[in-house]
Amino acid sequence: MPIYKAPVDEALFLLEDVLNFQEYGQLPGFGDLTGETLAAILGEAAKIYEEVAQPLNQSGDREGCHRHDDASVTTPKGFKEAFRALAEGGWIGLSVPAEYGGQGLPYTLTVLGNEFASSANMSFAMYSGLTQGAMAALLRHGSEEQKQTYLPKMVTGEWTGTMNLTEPQCGTDLGLLTTRAKPLPDGAYAISGQKIFISSGEHDLAENIIHLVLARIEGAPAGVKGISLFIVPKFDLKPDGSLGARNGVSCGSIEHKMGIHANSTCVMNYEEARGYLVGESNRGLNAMFVMMNEARLGVAVQGIAISEAAYQNAAQYAKERLQGRSLSGPKNPGGPADPLLVHPDIRRMLMEIRGFNEAARGLALSAALDSDLAHRSHDPAVRQAAEDRLGLLTPVMKGVFTDVGFQNAVMAQQIYGGYGYIAEGGMEQFVRDARITMIYEGANGVQALDLVGRKLPRDGGRAIMAYYREVGGFISRTTDEELAPYVKPLKASLDDLQKATLWLMQNALTKPENAGAASYEYMHLFGAVAMGYVWAKIAQAALAKMKRDPDSVPAMQAKLVTAKFYMERMLPQTALRLARIETGADTLMALAPEQF
């Protein structure tokens, strides 16, 4: 059976030593978070996911979800009890304001908790994760009445939430959406249409499910400008807020899919279902993008989470499995063979996974902190800078973290050899579960196009220029010779990113296909630089911690070695990415359709 231990110490180091979390005590929700309090919160989160969710991961995958003749859906054995324990612990509404029943704690802690949850049991984590995304959309765009009606019950887990975008004929291209919303005399709407691939669309974990549904009001403009967002509850509510009649929404089927078997991915049928407009009509995408952006960061974190769980199991296996002898002579002379860990190629794979995990976690937490700053700071300049940075980095994190997370799950499986292909060890489940992260919430090629086509030029390039100044300023200020092995490679990679950006500026406007051909490589180049920047800051913090805390030396030395490995063996990919970008689109687009 696979193992998992939440990386609490790693998270605390990132929060306290790298991100200087204590400096934000003036922000709402941050004031009481001492180091001891943070450790206690993360320790309790680790406990519930390690002890309650993780043991259900393999059994839930084997059992899956089942749809019954009455269109109801049951989740795997143990999920209802685990979900109730999660809700009673307050983990679903950790960052929701207290006036709606939440604890008002930083969103950064929710992101960390979601990493632990997805490492332990990704399918299970999605039920609460979708609910958190729905709550975020209602907090930003719902009326006060809607917030008071729905949020407290979602915080307690009595009700859950979903997002309904995709239809059989449209995924990314929401302009093709056909679900209809007919105005009713009482101000509600009758919603009719079909949605597919709806995660957590129907289940037995909560008494009501609050669907957020994109639909087109009769007479609305064509394309994305005519889309509105609606609340469509599974059970409509009586005037006193209690459950009323079953609404006209049902699960038509559960998708049979490669992974995340324990999450009910549903076809949802809407037949004159009562829905309630969220925000302004024809501006539904603005509201849904709040949920989508939060979901994209959540999916990026799933990439880290699967990579972390796969690493922990592969590292343990490499230390225990005896196979072959070391190239430099036996390391286990009393045994029949040496552990796998003596072999350089096994170490290469483990170090590549580890080099990603720690930096990606640091970048995700930095982005989550930006979200907290954007929503909680009283300084408009701070809010704007945080929003700019978060908007720029979200497609990078979603695309890069999930691509690499999947690759790392495969590498971890490879370390197991034939046993990695067998279900008992759990590695093949990590591979299957990780695969969807590259597809949902916007496929990674779309994330790359969003980065190059929208995020880079937005506001005259304000966000990317600010990022250059931030990283460049760190490099110019960091003159300590001890940090040179980390800063010099970062400078070279930042130069590659700037050259790639300039190439796009010079070549994409006159020939848009150059942007399309370069976008995926650019996204990964950017991601490598961003993680290199995090590693340089980790190295700086590790050196400082070693000097003031002798007990930390072994752990900090391990970080410095991993940082150096990243700089020497992983960050040089930026030169390769730049070379590919500069070839342009000509060869890529040269073949005629019939030649494929």
Image (cartoon, rainbow, N blue to C red):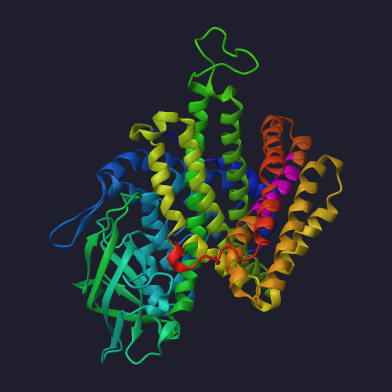
The secondary structure that most of the magenta stretch takes on is helix
Pick whichever, 244 or 562, lies toward us.
Answer: 562
- Residue 157 point in image, percent of width and height: 35, 59
- Tell me where residue 336 appears, x and y as whole percent: 49, 10
Up/down of 297 relative to 547, above or below: below
Determine whether, in the image, residue 366 is placed left or right of residue 62: right
Whether 565 is among the magenta residues is no
Give the residue displayed 52% in from the left and 14% down from the top.
337
Q: Answer above or below: position of 166 versus 430.
A: below
| Magenta segment boundaries in residue numbering | 528-542
- In the rendered image, the quadrant that contains the N terminus is top left
Query: Could you tell me residue 372's position as x and y percent?
Result: 59, 63
Q: Is 66 located above or below residue 387 in the figure?
A: above
Q: Residue furthest top?
A: 334
Position of the C terminus by quadrant: bottom left
Q: Is residue 240 visible?
A: no
Q: Nearer the viewer, residue 562 or 368?
A: 562
Residue 538 inside the magenta-drawn segment: yes
